[in-house]
Structure formats: structure tokens, C-alpha cells
Image (tube, helix red, strand yellow):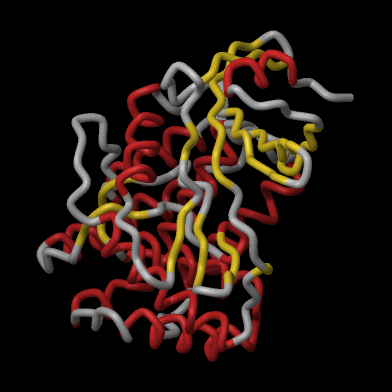
Amino acid sequence: MNDLDLELLSVRYGCRFDEAELVVGGVNRTYRLSTGTQHHYLRMYRPVGRSCAEIAFELRLLRQCRPTLGIDVARPIATSNGADLVSLSFEGWPRYGCLFTALEGRPLTHASDDMALFGLSIAKLHGALSGIAGSETRLLDPPALCRRAIEALESIADSAPIRRAIEAWCGPAFGEAARYHLPSGNCHGDVWAGNAVVQASGVGFFDFDDCGHGPYLIDLGTAAWHLIAQDGPAAEAHLAALISGYEAVRTLEEGERRFLFDFVRLAEVRSMRFLAEFNLLDEHQWQQTFARALLLFERERPF
């Protein structure tokens, strides 16, 4: 059943939407809106967890992202009266929505060639987003992100061991990392193969819901975490390709190499925070998640 008012959206955006297809459910719902053979994507933002100011910064970042050969981003489309957001409703809750341009391309794979291209494109994205500021910028501060995760996990049964592990690791890891003044700037925040497509001219990025300002290792660590979690024995080669691609644009500093694995662990922590805040797992799934996370905390640095 279609839960969007296509007539209302057609009026708001000044074009006729013929069809709506839900492509991503869950917390942030995403729809493909069709006008004949042309497509756009409507993001229905979650009702809690992000302020309007944070959403405004995301849209500013995408509007002001500098055109750069080899990368593209899904850019927001304003309504007929120039507004970035439209008011929507879902299951009785008020929601905000934003329409985005469609990025056509093939899925990004974990093959080494694709990972090298992905690393190269992440570095280019960092350059294209640099210097874009706003008072509503979300700070991606690792200790603060860990504290939020610990607070969110307090409501989850049997989470005490992982909360203690986060506390024991976070202070020493990021207290030491801070002394290295890691290169920082605007980050995608959740950069992995599922949030990108390969285009004829490079890589297109979308889903900037977690964007903010912080160490660039936020993005590299998140991409590496997905590879480690999904690729098993092949992860090492794919990680090498990812980092090699990134360094074709900007060579990692010694401190970044030293602390990269801590940002892989941080990606795990951020994932658990999101899952806990929106109560997305059952008891069995939480036990599996805690076991995986504890193994990651105990693992020796693979790079």
C-alpha cells in the first residue's frame, strides 16, 4: 500500500509524480518517485534523533559540495516555493521529507579494483566537502560518540560487559589520538559500499544522514569495518586496496595509520548506538552483536 500523497507531492514540487516505490524501510524511509522515465528519491527522515538544524547542515553540505571529477553526490531538490523540506506524516507521526536527485550506476562491490576506486573517491569527497561550515554542524567527536553509545545501551539487557569494554577502550584510545591532531573536516559519516554507486565518471555518494565534522578516519574506519565484518579472509586484500586508493589523493599521516583500527572499533560502537536508540534487535540478535563487538575489541590490529 502506498503511504505517500503523490498528489500533494506533485503540487509541492511542481511536477507530476506517477508512481512511488519504497526502496528502503526502517528508521529512515526512502522512496523512488517516478515521473515517466525520470526518477528522484524522497527521504522521509526519522521522527526523533536528528534536529532540523542538523538536517539543514546535511542539505547545505550537499548543495555546496564542489563539483569534482570522479565523484558525485545526490543533491537536494527544493520545492516550488524554495523550501528544502516538506512536512509528511507516517503512522500518525509528523515527519520531514526531502527530494534528492537520482544517481544512476552499478552497485559497488568489494573486489579490489572497486575498493581502490572507492578509497580514491572517499579522498576526493573529503576535498570537495572541505571548508563548508555552519553553526548547526554536527561534531563527530569520538569520545562523545562513545558516551552516547554507552547511554543508549543501558536500556538493553545484558549489555554491561560491552559497556565496560567501551569505557575501558575509549578514554585511552582517543585521548592519545587527540594528541596527534588527526586531519579532520566534513565527513560522510556512514561511507560504505551500500551508500555509493559506480558511475561512468567515478563514484556517486548518497545517504549523508550521519554527516558531520570530525577526523577523516571516521569514514575510512567505517568503510574498513564493513569489509572486516563481511569479507572474512579476503578483507586484508580489500582493505589494502581501499587505503591504497585513498592515498593516491592524500597520504595518510603516521598517526592516522596508528589509530585507524580504533576507528574501525568506533564504527562498531556507533552501529550499536543506532540499533539501541531505535530498539531494532531482539534478544538473540543483541547477544550475537555483543559477541561480535567483544571479539573486535580483543582482536589485534590487522593493519
- What residue appears at the point 30 percent right and 62 percent down from the top-left corner? 126
- What residue appears at the point 79 percent right and 21 percent down from the top-left corner? 3
Q: In front here: 103 or 299?
A: 103
Residue 99, image x and y in percent? 56, 33
Residue 177, image x and y in percent? 19, 65
Q: In front here: 296 or 101?
A: 101
- What residue appears at the point 39 percent right and 88 percent down from the top-left corner? 244
Quadrant in which the N terminus appears: top right
Q: Quadrant of residue 295?
A: bottom right
Q: Is residue 111 above or below residue 93?
A: below
Q: Is residue 139 above or below residue 237?
A: above
Q: In front here: 101 or 292?
A: 101
Residue 142, image x and y in percent? 30, 51
Q: Is residue 157 above or below residue 296?
A: above
Q: Is residue 169 above or below residue 40?
A: below
Q: Quadrant of residue 184?
A: bottom left
- What residue appears at the point 63 percent right and 88 percent down from the top-left corner? 234
Q: Residue furthest top?
A: 92
Q: Is residue 147 left or right of residue 2?
A: left
Quadrant in which the C terminus appears: bottom left
Q: Residue furthest right?
A: 1
Q: Is residue 148 left or right of residue 118?
A: left
Q: Count how many numbered circles sit on residues in the image.
A: 0
Q: Is residue 12 left or right of residue 243?
A: right
Residue 21, image x and y in percent? 79, 37
Q: Is residue 268 left or right of residue 35?
A: left
